[in-house]
Amino acid sequence: MSQEQNSIEIEKEAFSLLELTTRVKKTVYESFSDTYWVRAEMSDVRTNMSSGHCYLEFIEKNTITGQIVARARGTIWAKTFRMVKPYFEMETGQLFASGIKVLVKVIVEFHELYGFSLTVIDIDPAYTLGDMVRKRMEIIRQLQEEGVLTLNKELPFPALPQRIAVVTSATAAGYEDFLNQLSLNKAGYPFYVKLFPALMQGEKTEASVISALDKIYHYADSFDVVVIIRGGGATSDLNSFDSYLLAANCAQFPLPVITGIGHERDDTIVDMVAHTRMKTPTAVAEFLIGRMDAAADELNALQQDICASAVDVLQKRKNYLQLVGNRLPAIVVNKIERNRATLQALGSKLPTAASSLLKLRNSLLNAARLRLGNLAVFKLKEGERFIQLTEQFIKMASPEYILKRGYSLSLKNGKIIKHAADLQPGDELITRFADGSVYSTVNKIK
């Protein structure tokens, strides 16, 4: 076969793009003529404000790597969307938004211009609820395994919770209600409130509240409790408080955390790990006032107990004093009688005792007088002997006694000469002997 014939044959077998896409559309329609329930995650959800149609993508991710393994364009026409969206949000409590896993009933379509797509005609909220419950259970199980689920609940609650760190939006109506409830308490308790602003709805809620908690942590000694509150709003806004990171931060916070972020029937994971969960900001304020009331009641009870104890002690002392007062005259009379008998006995013994004592004293005086006379005689004799010895010593030491023994004394100018060196030639001397004196002049000193 020639090259020209081959080229013509290929031209005969070729399809135009429209022809091909039309055949694909027909095949899809014939093969997938029924409706199908599809599990997928919603992505890039957009609503056309003018038409009311909702355009989105359905994706599926690998459970291990998180990579997208399938993608399809989706459409929810306005008539269906007006019913599906509020029904889904009411049942699940979540906004109809990207990132949510859904079970949708779809029609498989293929358009020559827009390609493959899925048109949603119904949705099953139970599937999404089941996925939400599964995620919550996984978070709760993780907190339990880490041992932090009940840490905040185990903290001792302060007796007087007056210094309050509040995490909320500065413009939230719930914050104003909270402040009013505290400031208008009937007992007039003083509360000191410091606001740490945070976003309380939207995708940034988790990071914003954690940031506020981090700031409070640096001043933890300045506060008694932490209060996380939000006013009103859609139930779907509570999804941020089912976050693992936020719950872990609250559970491990060193101060008791009180929450007032939902309604009576709503219970987030943050509520579960908090020390105390209240339904609204006003209820949180009432709880704090109630704790102050309880402390005041306890103080009043203690005061009453002390007063009662004091009255009881005083009454017992009064009764004792009255008893003593009643018995005192008899005790005094008895004591006087015993003392009178003792005095009488002593009185009868006194003359004899006095006579005996006088005799004893007289005997002692006589003995002392005798000893004193003997001692005086002895002392006089001893003194006389001492005087005699002293006199004899003085006589022996006198110059006259020395001279009589053959010695002489040489004097110069009335002073005794003891050394030859004290004399000079020509000095006049007086030499005394026992029987007289000799006057001489020094001629030579050897």
Image: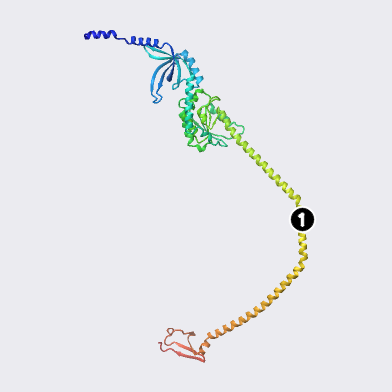
Asked whether residue 178 appears in the rendered view, the answer is: yes
Q: Is residue 360 above or below residue 156?
A: below
**Residue 420 locus on image (x, y percent):** 43, 85
Q: Is residue 384 above or below residue 195?
A: below
What residue is at 62 percent from the left and 82 percent from the top?
381
**Residue positioned most to the left:** 2
Left or right of 122, for residue 298: right
Q: Is residue 339 above or below residue 32?
A: below
Quarter where residue 161 is shown: top right
Asked whether residue 209 appears in the rendered view, the answer is: no
- Quadrant where the image shows the N terminus: top left
Q: Amino acid at mark 1?
A: Asn
**Residue 438 locus on image (x, y percent):** 48, 91
- Quadrant where the image shows the C terminus: bottom left
Q: Is residue 191 above or below residue 389?
A: above
Quarter where residue 157 is shown: top right
So how many labels did they put on this image?
Answer: 1
The residue pinned by badge 1 equals: 334
Label 1 residue SS? helix
**Residue positioned most to the bottom:** 435
Left or right of 57, for residue 291: right
**Residue 164 locus on image (x, y percent):** 53, 34
In the image shown, does 106 or 326 lie closer to the viewer? 106
